[in-house]
Amino acid sequence: MYFLLLYNADITKKILIADTKMDMCIIKLLTMIAAMLSMAIGENCGYVRGPLAFTNDTIVINLDCNHSAPASSPDYVPIQLHNNATHVAVQLVHCPTVPVGLFTNVTDNVTSVTVASEDAVQLLEGTFEGLSQVIELRLLGFTKLKIVSRSLLEPLRNIHTLVLDGFGSTNIMLSEIGSVIRALSGTPIRRLVLNKIRDQLFYEQIMQVDDFKIANASVKELIISDAPFSYEGSIRRAFPELVSFCGGGTTAQSAVTIPATWDLLLLSDHLKEFVSYRENDLLSLQAGSAAPYKPIPITQFVPSVMKGAKLANLYPDLLDYFLNKIKFASNREDCMLSFAFGFSNLTKLTANGFTVLMTSNKTICVEENNNIVHLDLSDSRMLTSDFEMPLASGFNKVKYLNLENMGIKKFPSAFLQCFPSLRLLKLSRNDVRFRRGRKFVVLVVGGRAAS
């Protein structure tokens, strides 16, 4: 079995191995190869706002409403474009009300439109008339909106990708944003990105998933990033053909919101990529008793999910899943939860920034017929008394394993045997000692040797 140890190049690190000079050369070579591979492997599905003009052929229009006739004026002129324009970006300035009919003269060749505003407060019906042929719409900013027509997006009958970045985050309720999105019923939309659509508040905010359900549509990719809220309702049933899900933000879960993502992760027949991240969990860990939430003992995981499912009364299939697992739990007494998880068609699993208190030294088990090849647990913590990484079983197809910044100090001697197909292992920002048969690979990270 071959595996690569990958480290960040920004701090001093050494590898000391009690073996021959040839082994040292091999380790150095593998590390160099790993560094090159890391440049080619994308780990984050989270949305990052690109430039206003994100293609070389994008036509950028700066529209200052203080220097143009209002839409109600007979002198008003919609945007004029040459016939071969395909990508258009409009930066609005001093436009509290976005001009209605702004795109009525757009040609059928335009396929992508970006509109950005920092001061708009109204988006009215008819704003996007003329964009029935567009397959991508990005709305950047619009944080100060107070009035949004529910039929705003109805003209977009050929839309494939919708990006709302900051949309209505200050004044518009989540349910109102959902009602705007639901106007895309019956369209070929495939990708929905919701980035920072709500500002951080002092109270818990919950996104009712069904408010965002798009009827007669087949959304394949859903990204909900920089979100100071959690979810209630079945994501799996609201988006039944979802292939890729990425969700993350800065909020803790409550009893009724914990089951939402587990219902999707464990029961979806189509999901292949699941990414979930929490931005402040490690900070909470360092804050001690002042943290907004404490690590959950692993033994309380199933009871917590089941309690939440019962309280919300929205996840009958998830309840049945766990009840069936518990019924036959005696079959896997070697497993930490007395049963093995099943992940159906999932191939990529990422969980960053989470903390679990490991109160058992048994194995974390998943069903061996899973298809996971990419497993990323970086920035998460599995708290044990001796900072030892727990054993796992069932990950027979995993080729990529990221355990960076997990506070790990040592591994069980049989750890690598749990991943027989492993090709790339990332361990930076850990103080680790590996036992490899009769040999030791001792890592010195940041000038401090692991014991």
Image: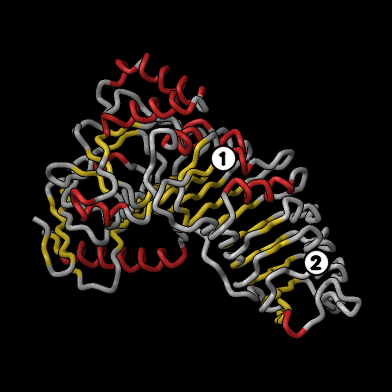
Q: Earlier in the sequence, mark 2 or mark 1?
A: 2
Query: Tag 2, which secondary structure?
Result: loop
Of the residues shown, which amino acid type is indicated by label 1? Val
Residue 249: % across, % down = 43, 53
Residue 286: % across, % down = 21, 55
Residue drawn 57% across the image and 70% down it? 50
Between 237 and 272, which is closer to the camera in this rendering? 237
Residue 446: % across, % down = 17, 68
Q: Which residue is mark 2?
A: 100
- Using the rendered image of the protein, determine whether residue 294 is visible from the camera's viewpoint: yes
Task: Report the disc number at residue 209.
Answer: 1
In this rendering, the label closer to the viewer, 2 or 1: 2
User: Which quadrant of the structure image shows residue 269?
Assistant: top right
Query: Tag 1, which secondary structure?
Result: helix
Distance from the alpha carbon under mark 2 to that under mark 1: 30 Å
Task: Please determine whether, in this image, residue 383 is positioned above or below residue 103.
Answer: above
Neighbourhood count class around disc 2 (C-alpha, 10 Å): few under 14, some 14–19, many 20 upward: some
